[in-house]
Image (cartoon, helix red, strand yellow):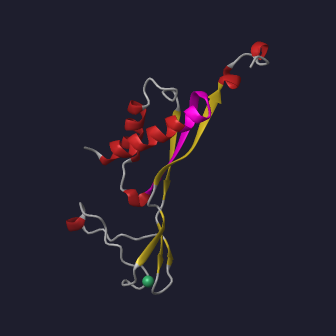
Amino acid sequence: MAHEMSVAEGMARAILKAAQREQAVKVAEISLEVGQLTFLNAEQVIFWLKELLRNSVAQEAEIVHKEIPARVRCSQCGYEGPLTAAEDPLLHLNLPVFACPGCQKGSLEILEGRDCIVRSIEILTEEDVSSPDNSQQK
Ligand SMILES: [Zn+2]
């Protein structure tokens, strides 16, 4: 099955757990960060997330996402910056080869772009949604 779906499942679990911990009555917004090197389709992740959050406190949440570009560091030449994957049509379906754009042979450490995470969620609690008249009751 789609990798996006299993990623969305983990996210949905984390979101609902956090919402429960904060006693949220509603999740208003969910911010995601999708790293370039995850090779995930962000639209698909969001699609599944919406499906999985249906009938939960987060079902009406607005889901926003930001793509995090890859940043790598080379252990040989000290190159630090974006990854440039060679566009080889024959290798199109494979993962790009992680060669250092500087020296072509150093091994790369991935600094950013490997994760697909829930960066933050915005929740509403009982207090937020109750009218001013009964806000004193607790
Ligand atoms: Zn290098």
Name the spot of residue 43 as percent of width and height, x first.
39, 42
Q: Nearer the viewer, residue 78 or 5?
A: 5
* Above or below, 16 relative to 87: above
Residue 34 inside the magenta-drawn segment: yes
Q: Which residues are magenta?
A: 18-35
Q: Nearer the viewer, residue 1 or 81?
A: 1
Residue 106, located in which quarter of the rendered image? Answer: bottom left
Is residue 109 something one can see in this rendering?
yes
Residue at the (25%, 43%) spot, across then down: 1
Is residue 43 something one can see in this rendering?
no
Q: Assign ligand 1 to one image quadrant.
A: bottom left
Count of all numbered marks drawn on residues in the image: 0
Q: Nearer the viewer, residue 77 or 27?
A: 27
Residue at the (51%, 83%) spot, across then down: 78
* Above or below, 64 relative to 74: above
Residue at the (46%, 61%) spot, across then down: 113
Please identify the quadrant where the C terminus is shown. top right
